[in-house]
Amino acid sequence: MNFFTPITVPILDDKISYQSKIISLGSCFAVHMAARLGQYQFVNTVNPFGILFHPLALEKLVDFAVKGHVFTPSDVFLHNDVWSCFDAHSDLNALEEEDILFQLNLKIRALREDLISGSHLIITLGTAWVYSEKSTQRMVANCHKLPQHIFEKTLLDAQTVKESLERLYLKVKELNPKIKLIYTISPVRHIKDGMIENQRSKSVLFVGLHDFMDTYKEVYYFPSYEMLVDELRDYRYYGPDLIHPNEIALQFVWEKFKESCIEATAFPVMKLVDEVQKGLAHRAFNPYSNQHQIFLEKIAEKIDHLLEQYPHMNFR
């Protein structure tokens, strides 16, 4: 007897290995999956400009990286004694103008290098609702808690989403023809927009993304949204806010991602890395006992073994 509807997950033809260099961009769900890649010590860059929810913001970020955009004072603003940038998340905010400009330029240069050398780019779309500054008609990635009356909120249409994704794809491929693009739609619901509005938004993303994929069939779609909404389909898999997936759901999706997108040859290494991470997190009752010293020596041996093969790994 089946107690849930299983989702068929396609197999990625160019799977991730420990030789891969992964870039993850998009919503908070991208952060959750990237955290697991980081936990297993894959080479992984995640959201250098912070969480970005809609496709136009992601396209603009990639455009900046490809063109080598240099941020100047005209790209930032001061509000409540904090410097911010409409193209970045508040994670990059700073108290001094030179500090935010330094970070923006440092991160955009690093992203360009990552895109040039990367093997996989994971794009997670969160919403099709966008905000534009009324005075300039400039689309923003983040409102930074400025008064809502200075922004105009609009819903992108599917054609705009498709065209934005196409431009992003072509820019990345021009920079790095070998990079593999992976797309997913975040299962996190944006209920601040309203439940009906959230469904409209997700629907636009689905139509725009899959219309884009009908043309560029070499890209890969990972059905994380369908796993939460259709396969698990129960509030027990959400956190207390009933919006974000809980740890059980995230682990379920991660296991599916592992099976479909990661080389089986990496599994033994992942197992060893997991043993080391758990060992480092262990807190002994008596840290000075002989038994614990032997335990630490075994962990150190495993770390040395891993670092001999994968020097990029970093255990702290």
Image (cartoon, helix red, strand yellow):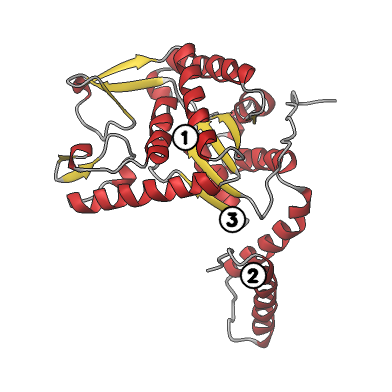
Q: CA distance from mark 1 to mark 3?
A: 19 Å
- Residue 84 % position (x, y): 23, 41
Question: Is mark 3 in CB contact (under 8 Å) with mark 2?
Answer: no
Mark 2 closeness class: few <14, some 14–19, many ≥20 residues within 10 Å: some
Q: Which mark is residue 27?
A: 1
Cα–Cα gap, marks 1 and 2: 32 Å
Q: For the residue labelled by badge 3, is the local secondary structure a helix, a strand or a loop?
A: helix
Q: Is residue 274 left or right of residue 158?
A: right
**Residue 218: quarter of image:** top right
Q: Which mark is residue 307?
A: 2
Dot 1 surroundings within 10 Å: few (below 14), some, or many (20 or more)?
many
Looking at the image, tell me whether mark 1 or mark 2 is earlier in sequence order: 1
Residue carrying label 3: 39
Does the rendering let one see residue 242? no
Q: Nearer the viewer, mark 3 or mark 2?
A: 2
Which amino acid, by three-letter code, is at mark 1? Ser
Say which quadrant the N terminus sits in.
top right
Give the quarter of the image for residue 272. Answer: bottom right
Residue type highlighted by circle 3: Gln
Nearer the observer, disc 1 or disc 2? 2
